[in-house]
Image: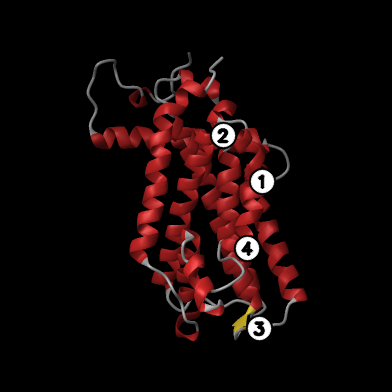
């Protein structure tokens, strides 16, 4: 088994390491896995690792441009380009994080021979890559649209960032659950794509809660992503929109999903065949 290039990243057997050193080691491991994932997925040809940004950028730009072309300039008093952009980019983050997590452990089973690696390291590398790719794609498209006056900066950056934070938490929790479930049951892989499509109408991507009938609002707000979207749109448009969200509920549900995922990681290893 090859040893890490940095000897300090491989503590001597039986030696106790501090929390800070352990945290530093995790960053080193996840960083190395991210580079490996980029090389494996995109190679060195053409633009190489820049596809981690280019792929979501093309999706985001294409969908936003298409919606802007076929829909009126404004809906419910909101500019369509910015509404679609603030909707599709977070949805793309969730879909990519979840789909890339499926069978993640099986695809990298040989790496689990290394004592420094854990199943969470493999997942963290993919989740961070998808998060960075989606956010950078959003920023690039937003800057491009702003040149043509189709996008303006958020009115409340704090609320805007908070919505993105909860969307990242929700996506990461779902990715962990799907990653573990796909190793435990074959059918999970088969329903992942369908689940991604089903998320489109219920995620909050294409609507705001205030547009719904009062009875439908109650059901919409059961979905954690809807709360995240409401914060993102509230931060984007400020007082010009009415938003509905519950910080306590979205915090609890995202934490609960994350805890369920972490519990599943404790038993998933026995389902992984390391060859």
**What element does badge 4 sit on?**
helix
Q: What residue do we see at 51% from left, 66% from top?
A: 220
Q: Which residue is mark 2?
A: 182
Q: Secondary structure beneath disc 2?
A: helix
Q: Nearer the viewer, mark 2 or mark 3?
A: 2
Tag on residue 193? 1
Q: Residue at x 72, y 38 (%)?
A: 45
Q: Residues within 10 Å of mark 2 (few under 14, many from 20)?
A: many
Q: Earlier in the sequence, mark 4 or mark 3?
A: 3
Question: Would you say 14 lies left or right of 233 here?
Answer: left
Picture coordinates of residue 161, whole percent (x, y): 43, 65
Residue 72 locus on image (x, y percent):
72, 82
Q: CA distance from mark 2 to mark 1?
A: 13 Å
Q: Residue at x 55, y 60 (%)?
A: 90
Rendered image quadrant of residue 211: bottom right
- Numbered disc 3: secondary structure: strand
Q: CA distance from mark 2 to mark 3?
A: 41 Å
Q: Is residue 158 above or below residue 34?
A: below
Q: Are marks 2 and 3 in contact (CB under 8 Å)?
A: no
Residue 5 occupies quadrant: top left
Disc with the residue nearer the chain's start (2 vs 1): 2
Q: CA distance from mark 1 to mark 4?
A: 14 Å
Q: Is residue 83 visible?
A: yes
Residue 197 lies, with reference to residue 241, above or below; the image says above
Does the residue at mark 4 contact the one at mark 2 (Cβ under 8 Å)? Answer: no
**Which residue is nearer to you in this view: 101 or 227?**
227
| Precedes in sequence: disc 2 or disc 3 | 3
| Lower position in the chain sequence, tag 3 or tag 1 | 3
Q: Please name the residue that numbered disc 3 is placed on.
A: 74
- Nearer mark to the viewer, of 3 and 1: 1
Of the numbered discs 4 and 2, the one sitting upstream in the chain is 2
Quickly name the residue at label 4: 201
């Amino acid at each position: 088994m090859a040893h890490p290039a940095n000897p300090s990243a491989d503590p001597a057997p039986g030696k106790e390491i501090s929390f800070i050193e352990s945290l530093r080691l995790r960053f080193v491991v996840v960083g190395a896995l991210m580079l490996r994932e980029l090389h494996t997925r995109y190679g060195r040809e053409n633009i190489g690792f820049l596809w981690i940004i280019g792929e979501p950028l093309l999706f985001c730009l294409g969908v936003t441009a298409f919606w802007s072309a076929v829909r009126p300039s404004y809906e419910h008093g909101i500019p369509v380009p910015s509404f679609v952009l603030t909707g599709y980019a977070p949805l793309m983050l969730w879909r990519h994080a979840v789909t890339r997590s499926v069978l993640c452990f099986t695809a990298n089973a040989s790496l689990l021979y290394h004592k420094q690696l854990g199943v969470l390291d493999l997942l963290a590398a993919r989740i961070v890559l998808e998060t960075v790719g989606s956010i950078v794609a959003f920023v690039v498209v937003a800057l491009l649209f702003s040149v043509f006056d189709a996008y303006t900066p958020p009115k409340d950056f704090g609320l805007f960032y908070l919505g993105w934070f909860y969307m990242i938490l929700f996506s990461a929790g779902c990715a962990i659950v799907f990653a573990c479930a796909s190793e435990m049951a074959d059918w999970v892989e088969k329903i992942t794509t369908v689940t991604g499509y089903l998320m489109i109408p219920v995620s909050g991507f294409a609507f705001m809660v205030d547009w719904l009938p009062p009875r439908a609002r109650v059901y919409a707000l059961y979905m954690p992503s809807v709360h995240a979207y409401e914060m993102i749109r509230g931060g984007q448009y400020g007082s010009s929109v009415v938003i509905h969200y519950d910080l306590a509920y979205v915090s609890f549900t995202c934490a609960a999903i994350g805890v369920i995922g972490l519990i599943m990681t404790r038993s998933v290893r026995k389902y992984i065949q390391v060859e």
